[in-house]
Amino acid sequence: MKINFYNQKGSLLLEILLAVAVGAIIIGAVSGLVYVSLKSGQISGQKSAAVFLAEEGMEATQSISEADWHSIYLPPDGAGDPDAGKGDANPYYIYKNGFFWALGKVTLGDEGDIPIDGIIYTRKIYIENVTRDKTGERQICDGVGICAEEVNDPSTQKIKVAVSKIGGADVVLEEYLTRWKNNTFSQSDWSGGEGQTDFIDSSKYYDENGNIDNTSIPGSIKLKQ
């Protein structure tokens, strides 16, 4: 009986050891699954944040173009270079100027940095001139602003918004913006504008006086007999 007691005790100890080993394996497997799940959720959240920033950047750039097309065509403030100020070598960033979005030139390199939940995302805006061939199809400049003048389309610009973070893939959105909501020219009188000729009298806005008498009552025009 004494020998049997020790045998039972040894068997019980072995079962305990096996149970502990199995438990450790299960806990390790579950911990691995939890880690993978948390990591996957973290990556998914960071991806969603990058997509949101890219979409916000595109919408803000479109808003800027609708308010003042020249801020896009002559970046960043309507007084820039329409050719040399564009392409991948000339990134811009967006910022709030009061209640409105505005465009700024990236000069220090970190103007487009945005911190979210301890992660630094970098958002940059790129602008490209657009030309059209004889059929009206769009063409993109070669990246340094050199376009055929006869087919250049100053009312269309290609916008690229790129969002990146360290250790993550870039999110890039591209879209063509047009100035269809903007007036290209407003003629309030006959004193100027494309196609106008010189005036013999700038205060009366006509370019010839054949058979016209402009020396009579002010405000009236009388044809000579």
Image (cartoon, grey):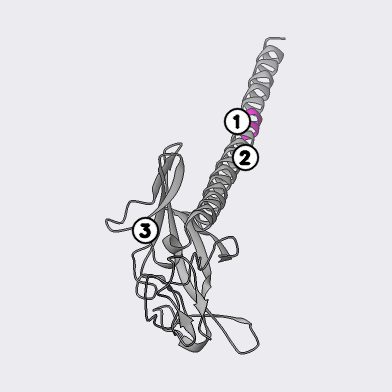
Q: Quadrant of residue 192?
A: bottom left
By secondary structure, the bulk of the magenta-drawn segment is best described as helix
* Image marks 2 and 1: residues in contact by CB distance under 8 Å: no
Q: Can the viewer see residue 41?
A: yes
Q: Residue furthest left?
A: 108
> In the image, what residue occupies the spot 37% across and 81% down?
200
Report crowding for label 3: few under 14, some 14 to 19, many 20 or more residues within 10 A (C-alpha).
Answer: some
Q: Is residue 208 left or right of residue 37?
A: left
> In the image, what residue occupies the spot 43% across and 76% down?
214
Pointer 3 residue: 77
Range of magenta residues: 22-26
State the image coordinates of residue 196 (x, y, percent, origin top left).
46, 80
* Residue 37, numbered circle: 2
Nearest-to-viewer mark from 2 and 3: 3
Q: Which quadrant, please, contains the N terminus?
A: top right
State the image coordinates of residue 61 (x, y, percent, origin top left).
50, 55
> In the image, what residue occupies the spot 56% across and 46% down?
43
**Residue 198 or 20: which is nearer the viewer?**
198
* Residue 112, numbered circle: none
Pointer 1 residue: 24
Report crowding for label 2: few under 14, some 14 to 19, many 20 or more residues within 10 A (C-alpha).
Answer: few
**Residue 165 or 208: which is nearer the viewer?**
208
Determine whether the residue tagged by mark 3 lies in a helix, strand or loop: loop
